[in-house]
Image (cartoon, rainbow, N blue to C red):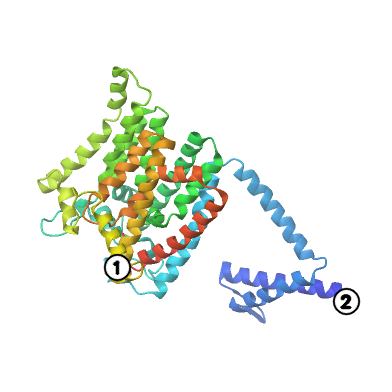
């Protein structure tokens, strides 16, 4: 009898502390006569001790019965609700929520603890902005400026015309119902990027499952994109997630022979990034895959007319602003960026320096040596995967991956290469279809370590773009 009273007393004490903690969390505390409930420290510490003690003592518990009954009801309702949600949505939400929660926590702590490597290029318009800053760095300020003030061009300095319009247009549209102010635009940028990220992963999941006939391959594919170290840009104030969504929809619709839809999404992909027009190559190859008659092929290609029209439309706007239809490309030169170099030149330079200096001394060659090596390693991995993409996924997707690598590799710098690879969904589909159980575990562990590191680099304004 005494033991039963002791167990019941422990249950009552635990329930009381849980109730008090709930009051503090939900209502900021309460005055209960002689009892004041405002400080969360004591209930938390008490529960940390009492709950394990109660579990260790064992015996029947009315509190445990209540918890089990409530949990059973919640689980039943959750199962009923999720039964109506497609596997693609469930797998995507699991991947994104788990990875994003850990990533945001690491980014926030890093922003609290570490000083930025350089002065921040802009100020987010929020008090206690440490959390909001984890979503924006480097090019984020340009997208925000375009969404807020529109484009401008300067011949003697960097200007916003170098950035393509789809993402900032979506930011402005999403912020407009809320007044279109600075805060609304920043929040809109985050919401648009995250929504596009989720929708892109759902589209990739469905596309992969259709191609391989396996939900497990599709699940691994979206998980690999979520944990990929450079995918940190997909949920930041950057255009990557919007481009990923539009490009995968363009290709998947072409696979389904929905040519007009493919042309529409291809046009949006063209407006998302400077190299977005490359989406026309896989679409044209998909239109020719079944060797249609000349007239049928011509009709299919005609459905892709929105792609060059979108490119020409933005170029016409740039011409009106700058006097040069390719002024957006000229503007990029103020970042020291140029194309037309041998695509192996930058890779060869980094590999030669690494071999000559040795695997340790190389890192002390320059301040950006580490970042260049990370970009180089990423590019080499994707180049190695490209022949397998041709073999497993076909010529169209293989060509898309290849040209999407060769164009940035033909520049005079390696910056941005990791970010460009984060949207090459055919490579992730390939890895998802080939990974063994052990390789799967290793991929997740290694990727998450580097992803956390890259997030910290981004938040602290290290040279990772």
Q: Quadrant of residue 372?
A: bottom left
Query: CA gap, disc 1 to disc 2?
Result: 75 Å
Residue at the extreme bottom: 34
Q: Is residue 296 above or below residue 258?
A: above
Q: Are marks 1 and 2 in contact (CB under 8 Å)?
A: no
Q: Callout 1 environment at 10 Å: few (<14), some (14 to 19), or many (20+)?
A: some
Residue drawn at 86 percent across, 75 percent down: 3
Residue drawn at 41 percent across, 31 percent down: 255
Q: Element at badge 2?
A: helix
Q: Is residue 415 above or below residue 111?
A: above
Give the residue number, with chain letter if any, for mark 2.
2
Mark 1 or mark 2, which is nearer to you? 1
Q: Callout 2 environment at 10 Å: few (<14), some (14 to 19), or many (20+)?
A: few
Q: Quadrant of the N terminus?
A: bottom right
Q: Element at badge 1?
A: helix
Q: Quadrant of the C terminus?
A: bottom left
Residue drawn at 35 percent across, 32 percent down: 262
Q: Is residue 51 above or below residue 402?
A: below
Q: Quadrant of residue 57?
A: bottom right
The residue lying toward the viewer, choosing from 136 and 171, is: 136
The residue lying toward the viewer, choosing from 343 and 225, is: 343
Sequence-wise, which precedes: disc 1 or disc 2? Answer: 2
Query: Mark on residue 62?
Result: none
Residue drawn at 29 percent across, 30 percent down: 304
x, y (%) of residue 107?
42, 66
x, y (%) of residue 138?
29, 61
Query: Mark on residue 357?
Result: 1
384 left or right of 148 in image: right
x, y (%) of residue 64?
75, 63
């Amino acid at each position: 009898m005494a033991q039963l009273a002791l167990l019941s007393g422990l249950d009552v004490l635990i329930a009381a502390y849980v109730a008090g903690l709930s009051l503090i969390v939900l209502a900021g505390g309460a005055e209960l006569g002689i009892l004041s409930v405002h400080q969360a420290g004591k209930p938390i510490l008490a529960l940390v001790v009492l709950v394990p003690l109660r579990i260790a003592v064992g015996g029947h518990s009315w509190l445990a019965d209540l918890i089990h009954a409530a949990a059973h009801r919640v689980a039943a309702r959750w199962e009923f609700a999720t039964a109506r949600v497609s596997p693609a949505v469930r797998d995507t939400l699991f991947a994104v929520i788990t990875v994003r929660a850990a990533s945001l926590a690491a980014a926030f702590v890093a922003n609290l603890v570490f000083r930025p490597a350089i002065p921040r290029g802009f100020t987010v318009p929020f008090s206690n902005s440490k959390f909001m800053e984890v979503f924006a760095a480097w090019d984020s300020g340009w997208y925000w400026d375009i969404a807020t003030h529109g484009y401008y061009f300067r011949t003697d300095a960097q200007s916003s015309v170098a950035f393509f319009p789809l993402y900032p247009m979506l930011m402005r549209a999403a912020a407009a119902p809320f007044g279109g102010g600075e805060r609304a635009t920043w929040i809109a940028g985050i919401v648009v990027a995250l929504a596009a990220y989720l929708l892109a992963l759902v589209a990739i999941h469905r596309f992969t499952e259709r191609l391989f006939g396996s939900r497990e391959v599709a699940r691994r594919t979206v998980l690999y994109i979520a944990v990929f170290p450079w995918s940190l840009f997909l949920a930041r104030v950057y255009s990557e997630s919007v481009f990923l969504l539009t490009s995968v929809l363009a290709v998947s619709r072409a696979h389904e022979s929905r040519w007009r839809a493919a042309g529409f999404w291809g046009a949006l992909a063209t407006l998302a990034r400077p190299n977005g027009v490359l989406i026309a190559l896989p679409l044209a190859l998909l239109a020719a895959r079944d060797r249609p008659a000349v007239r049928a092929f011509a009709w299919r290609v005609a459905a892709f007319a929105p792609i060059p029209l979108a490119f020409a439309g933005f170029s016409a706007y740039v011409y009106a602003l700058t006097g040069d239809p390719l002024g957006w490309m000229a503007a990029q030169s103020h970042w020291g960026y140029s194309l037309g170099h041998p695509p192996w030149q930058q890779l060869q330079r980094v590999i030669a320096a690494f071999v000559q200096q040795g695997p340790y001394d190389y890192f002390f060659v320059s301040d950006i040596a580490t970042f260049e090596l990370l970009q180089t390693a990423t590019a080499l991995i994707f180049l190695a995967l490209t022949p397998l993409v041709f073999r497993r996924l076909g010529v169209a997707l293989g060509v898309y991956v290849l040209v999407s690598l060769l164009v940035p590799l033909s520049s005079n710098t390696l910056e941005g290469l990791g970010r460009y690879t984060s949207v090459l969904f055919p490579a992730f589909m390939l890895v998802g279809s080939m990974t063994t159980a052990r390789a799967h575990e290793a991929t997740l562990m290694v990727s998450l370590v580097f992803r956390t590191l890259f997030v910290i680099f981004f938040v602290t304004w290290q040279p990772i773009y």
